[in-house]
Image: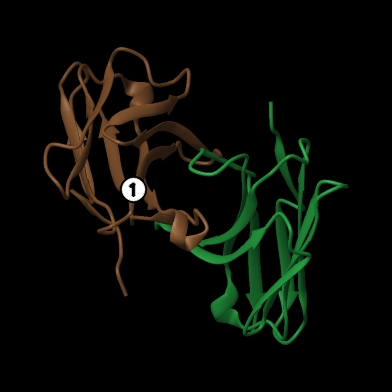
Chain colours: A brown, B green
Amino acid sequence: EPEVTQTPSHQVTQMGQEVILRCVPISNHLYFYWYRQILGQKVEFLVSFYNNEISEKSEIFDDQFSVERPDGSNFTLKIRSTKLEDSAMYFCASSGYWVNYEQYFGPGTRLTVT
Amino acid sequence: KQEVTQIPAALSVPEGENLVLNCSFTDSAIYNLQWFRQDPGKGLTSLLLIQSSQREQTSGRLNASLDKSSGRSTLYIAASQPGDSATYLCAVLKAAGNKLTFGGGTRVLVKP
């Protein structure tokens, strides 16, 4: 069964460093998403991407964040200058209209900022 | 702004008992609702999706109901097993292709 994959599974970085989180969505899905979950808190939406552009973003997704679909398979989230409060589990998801927009999630990348 | 609430936050039951998990949302204009399972430190596994036009959806021992007008969904898990121990999350989708808004989850422990 097709699945969303994410790399790395765990990333440790120092405050102020740039990180890139990578995702391979399910092929032939058209909608892509990033969510995050701070330990003990709700899963919260960051950004959605459709037709090669951002379709919606939350107030969390400020100028320090960017997304890219550099080729036909990868979807990346970049954080330019990480802060301690960026420590969280980051989930990528994808969906398509033929699955009634059901969102399929990857296993997540645990980002630890020290 | 859509708010999703799950009560109780935690639940402990003996093996074999049926589980009833509640989800409520403030804006009834939804496209669909998904129930997820999350194991500690892991990703989200989609269990069931209910379209806004549906009242119920079933998969094996799982049954989810939706009352859109009152802003409620219930997930029933029949004959619980220790392997059902996990956190269960509900999330609502406002429109096709939109973001999901999540509840805080119900942490379930099924004791052998």
**What quarter of the picture does the C terminus of chain A occupy?**
top left
In this view, the residue in front, A96 or B86, is: A96
In this view, the residue in front, A23 or A38, is: A23
**What quarter of the picture does the N terminus of chain A occupy?**
bottom left
Q: Chain of mark 1?
A: A
**Residue A28 percent across, percent down from the top left:** 28, 57
- Can see residue B39? no
Q: Is the residue A103 above or below the residue A58 in the image?
A: below
From this viewpoint, which residue is outermost toward the right?
B70
Helix, strand, or loop for circle 1? loop
Task: Count the numbered circles shown.
Answer: 1
From the viewer's perspective, tell me whether residue A7 is left or right of residue B8. Answer: left
Residue drawn 62% across the image and 39% down it:
B94
**Residue A16 percent across, percent down from the top left:** 19, 16
From the viewer's perspective, tell me whether residue B111 is left or right of residue A110. Answer: right
From the viewer's perspective, tell me whether residue B13 is left or right of residue A70. Answer: right
**Residue A108 percent across, percent down from the top left:** 33, 50
Disc 1 crowd rating (10 Å Cα; few below 14, some 14-19, many 20+) is some
In this view, the residue in front, B66 or B102, is: B66
Indicate the amino acid at tag 1.
Leu
**Residue A65 percent across, percent down from the top left:** 29, 21
Residue drawn 66% across the image and 58% down it:
B51
Q: Is the residue A93 above or below the residue A52 in the image?
A: below
Q: Dot 1 corresponds to which residue?
A: A30
From the viewer's perspective, tell me whether residue A1 is left or right of residue B78. Answer: left
- Can see residue B79? yes
Residue drawn 34% across the image and 55% down it:
A106
Residue drawn 64% across the image and 52% down it:
B32
From this viewpoint, which residue is outermost toward the top?
A63
Q: Is the residue A63 above or below the residue A85 in the image?
A: above
